[in-house]
Image: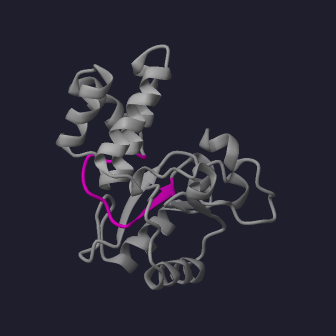
């Protein structure tokens, strides 16, 4: 769903944020409203398992990450074991079993980004933030993670921050992006 919608933007314009594409309100719902919404979606599916990733994303959007409690809730809603859901959550780069920062920086480590210096980008961001790969800044603002191909190969090296893609990265561009993020309030519904 997301990848198809994101592909519709013009090459010469900035990519839309995932929030703009999805308009998911799960982070603003009360736990009871979210549960009712998820139950409705699950009931519409041929098999509840079809909704597993969507349920996990919705719970993550509500809580910021997939805690053990959130995994038990998903298990109860879907009729799947917590282990089955944990296998899904640990497979996908954008599902988080541990708390993450307000802004999650995914640096592309695909072959094309690798050829265009992704490691220097990763090292530069890590140095600027004072964290290692997989780390979160002490103020809880940023988490730095690698990810597979973002589909931005023509603008490598690239990174994705809360659903927004940035390409043709340089030190100056990275500094500008980090400063802008420090100065703005993050959206209520984070696509991390």
Q: Is residue 38 above or below residue 184?
A: above
Q: Answer left or right for 192 relative to 67.
A: right
Q: Is residue 92 or residue 192 the one in the foreground?
A: 192
Is 55 included in the stretch rendered in magenta?
no
Residue 95 appears anywhere in the view: no
Q: Is residue 131 above or below residue 58?
A: below
Q: Quadrant of residue 157?
A: bottom right
**Residue at 26%, 77% in the rendered image:** 139
**Residue at 49%, 60% in the rendered image:** 162
Tell me residue 121's x, y (percent).
50, 68
Labels in figure, total:
0
**Residue at 71%, 66% in the rendered image:** 14
Q: Answer left or right for 84 relative to 189.
A: left
Residue 177 appears anywhere in the view: yes
Residue farthest along the top direction in this orientation: 46
Q: Main secondary structure of the magenta part?
A: loop
Tell me residue 129's x, y (percent).
36, 77
**Residue at 57%, 52% in the rendered image:** 23
**Range covered by the magenta-colored residues:** 94-108
Q: Is residue 133 above or below residue 94?
A: below
Tell me residue 114's x, y (percent).
56, 54
Q: Is residue 110 or residue 96 the one in the foreground?
A: 96
Q: How is the image coloured?
A: one colour
Q: Quadrant of residue 188?
A: bottom left
Tell me residue 168's x, y (percent).
66, 68
Which quadrant, please, contains the C terminus? bottom left
Q: Is residue 75 or residue 90 the one in the foreground?
A: 75
Q: Is residue 178 above or below residue 120?
A: below
Which quadrant, please, contains the N terminus? top right
Q: Is residue 115 or residue 80 the one in the foreground?
A: 80
């Amino acid at each position: 769903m997301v990848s198809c919608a994101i592909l519709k933007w013009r090459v010469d314009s900035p990519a839309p944020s995932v929030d703009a594409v999805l308009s998911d309100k799960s982070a603003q719902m009360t736990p009871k409203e979210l549960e009712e919404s998820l139950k409705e979606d699950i009931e519409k599916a041929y098999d509840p398992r079809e909704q597993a990733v969507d349920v996990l994303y919705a719970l993550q959007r509500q809580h910021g990450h997939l805690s053990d409690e959130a995994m038990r809730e998903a298990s109860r809603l879907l009729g799947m074991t917590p282990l089955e859901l944990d296998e899904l959550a640990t497979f996908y780069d954008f599902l988080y079993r541990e708390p993450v920062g307000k802004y999650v920086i995914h640096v592309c480590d695909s072959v094309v980004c690798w050829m265009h210096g992704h490691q220097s980008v990763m090292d530069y961001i890590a140095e600027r933030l004072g964290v290692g790969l997989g780390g979160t800044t002490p103020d809880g603002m940023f988490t730095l993670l690698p990810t597979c191909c973002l589909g931005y190969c023509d603008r490598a090296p690239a990174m994705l921050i809360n659903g927004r893609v940035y390409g043709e990265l340089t030190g100056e561009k990275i500094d500008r992006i980090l400063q802008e993020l420090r100065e703005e309030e993050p959206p209520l519904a984070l696509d991390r």
